[in-house]
Image (cartoon, grey):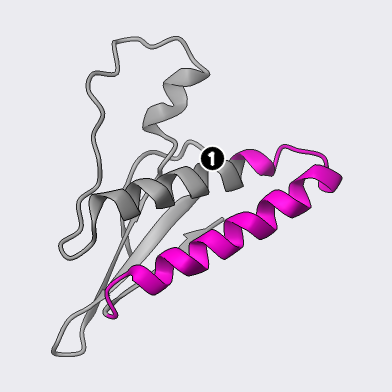
Amino acid sequence: MPWVIGDESGFPKRCFTFSLPDGRKTTFCIVWVQWPSFLWRRPQPDPGPERYLEIEGVRPELLRDLEIVDTIRWLSTHLSSELAKPVEAAAAQSIRAIQEKMPQHLSMTLEP
């Protein structure tokens, strides 16, 4: 069972699988849009300062890019299919580019 940061808000989870040198693997997931959801809801209490996920060996800018692309991808699911298709295609291309920049021992999946 992967470790999940976030609640059961209905937003998609981005999961990472970390392969250890001895062959063991560990998976953890994060709900990217759980914290920024205050944009759609009145913040009570104040959400406080931004917190970013840190993964050793991964540049913070890359994780921020992934968070933005995942958020855009999730938002596109609420568009009409005509508008959603090009957004989804661009997001998929960006996610592939991000995966290529991840360390070899770290893979990503997107949970529904």
What residue is drawn where x is 80% and y is 43%? 83
Q: Which residue is mark 1?
A: 10
Q: Would residue 101 be found to the left or right of residue 84 on screen?
A: left
Where does the image place residue 29, in percent across and percent down from the top left?
35, 56
Which residue shows up at 24% across the image and 50% down it? 60
| Residue at 46% over, 43% down | 68
| Number of numbered discs on residues | 1
Residue 4 visible: no
Residue 17 image point, x, y percent: 32, 71
Quarter in which the C terminus is drawn: bottom right
Magenta stretch?
A: 75-104
Q: Quadrant of residue 52?
A: top left
Q: Is residue 38 left or right of residue 17?
A: right
Q: Residue at x 58, y 64 (%)?
A: 93
Quadrant (top left/top right/bottom left/bottom right) for the N terminus: bottom left
Q: Residue 16 at x, y = what percent?
A: 34, 65
Q: Secondary structure at mark 1?
A: loop
* Residue 99 falls in image quadrant: bottom left
Q: Is residue 93 magenta?
A: yes
Q: Is residue 86 visible?
A: yes
In this view, which residue lies farthest toward the bottom? 22
Left or right of residue 45, residue 74 in this image: right
Q: Is residue 92 magenta?
A: yes
Neighbours of disc 1 within 10 Å: few (<14), some (14-19), many (20+): few
Q: Main secondary structure of the magenta part?
A: helix
Q: Nearer the viewer, residue 104 or 97?
A: 97
Residue reaching furthest to the right: 82
Camera-side residue of 57 and 44: 57
Residue 73 percent coordinates (x, y)? 59, 48
Mark 1 is on which residue type?
Answer: Gly
